[in-house]
Image (cartoon, rainbow, N blue to C red):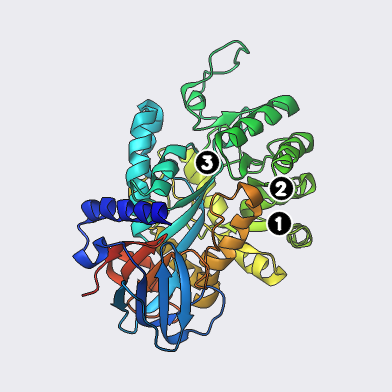
Amino acid sequence: MRKLKLKKLTAALAVAVSFCLPASAQDASGPILFTNVNVFDGVNEALIENANVVVTDNLITSISTEPLAVAGGRVIDGGGRTMIPGLIDVHWHTYYANVPVNIMASGDMPEVAIMGMTGAKDTLMRGFTTIRDVGGNPFAVKKFADAGTHPGPRMYISGPPISQTGGHFDFRGKNDVPSNSVDVLPYWERVGLVALADGVPEAIKRTRENLRMGATQIKIAGGGGVTSLYDPVDVQEYTFEEMKAIVDVAKTWNTYVAAHIFTDAAIQTAIRAGVKSIEHGNLIKDEKTLQMMKDNGVWLSAQPLLNDEDALIFDNPVSTAKFIEVTDGTAANYKLAKKMGVKIAFGTDMLFDPSAAAKQGKMLSKLDEWFTPYEALKMATSDNAELLMMSGPRNPYQEGPLGVIAEGAYADLILVDGNPLENLDLVGDAEANFDLIMKDGVIYKNTLQ
């Protein structure tokens, strides 16, 4: 217990230096009692009104509508604000989201890591206390965030995304093929930003390497992509045998595989191979695909990406055209999946533009086009947490539940100035509307006086 408290104190001091928090937020010793808050618990639509919540160390230890007291701790008056669980983004890229595309062309891993660590702090300050990183090598960022020495969210890391030659994560130059089996690996492969594997033996090897690194789940490219230049979005990437080999390895480690895929044919192959999380799926047109997903417990990890004022900007016409094709299917994708009763998760997939990454919360608010505010907030909290739990014993955070406000859950909390169950736009501007952000029992933002 003493060691745990010391860890919290160290984290709080580090954050105080970084953010110049009020003195009341810099003291991490003793329990914290939140009074006069209306609690959205992440599961139920009805708020627990005028509640009191106690946080001890890094866990929620009491929730009551009756008066509570804590000995030797602090009292924070919520002033009638809405308390919600920390938000979860299950399709995030700690590195890709914060690194301009020119760095990918001419930069190096130290630049990428520094930008990723800085971006991790920004992610946390937007209220996203947990992310699933589905492509990259931010294990060092996770290490420092978990230790509390640098602000950042909890991280479920897939490691280098695995792709075939000519697939979505083949970032080599036009003239880099044909390759020679004795050639040195390209730089971004050597540093673990991406991984290429062709054939069952290579696919097995790369999967085991990712798990050795500490991956909580595996990410593959099972279909064409937008940012990649050499694969049209209609193609299936990896054969059934290759996909199944990757899934079989993940199963031996008691975890699962997520696959970047857009189309019906590729998704159906992935489901038969045992993939459990379909990333994107914008071009699904056949209800059979969604029925297969529902019958096999497969999640649709979708993103509200649209060709609107927040559209991702690309430096080439090929990716721009593919982005338009894919985002034209976003609305139909959400509507059909909701109609079919498929489990839907929330992610953002912001890429190669820190200004776009800053709109992470705004992306969540865009779900109100297809979902009620309650459905959207539940998706970004307890539903997303359910998907994360599929990593089983590879889950690095097993002390308590995530995505809920309940006794014994991790103390990842936000105090919102207003009620996001009535106005989802509140989550789109964390700077203005999130008056307090807590992760793991440590207060990272507190504007309450």
Q: Residue at image x 56%, y 12%?
A: 183
Rendered view: 292 above or below 85: above
Q: Do the residues bearing badges 2 and 3 touch, measured as CB atoms within 8 Å?
A: no
Amino acid beneath label 2: Val
Q: Name the residue under label 3.
A: 135
Q: What element carries label 2?
A: loop
Residue 243 appears in the figure: yes
> Between marks 3 and 1, how big is the CA–CA gap?
20 Å
| x and y percentages locating residue 236 in the rendered image | 70, 40
Q: Do the residues bearing badges 3 and 1 touch, measured as CB atoms within 8 Å?
A: no
Amino acid beneath label 1: Val
Q: Mark 2 points at which residue?
A: 275
Looking at the rendering, which quadrant does residue 422 occupy?
Answer: bottom left
| x and y percentages locating residue 423 in the rendered image | 41, 78
Q: Is mark 3 on a helix, strand or loop?
A: loop
Q: Nearer the viewer, residue 369 or 308?
A: 369
Rendered view: 243 above or below 419: above
Q: Name the residue under label 1.
A: 298
| x and y percentages locating residue 149 in the rendered image | 33, 46
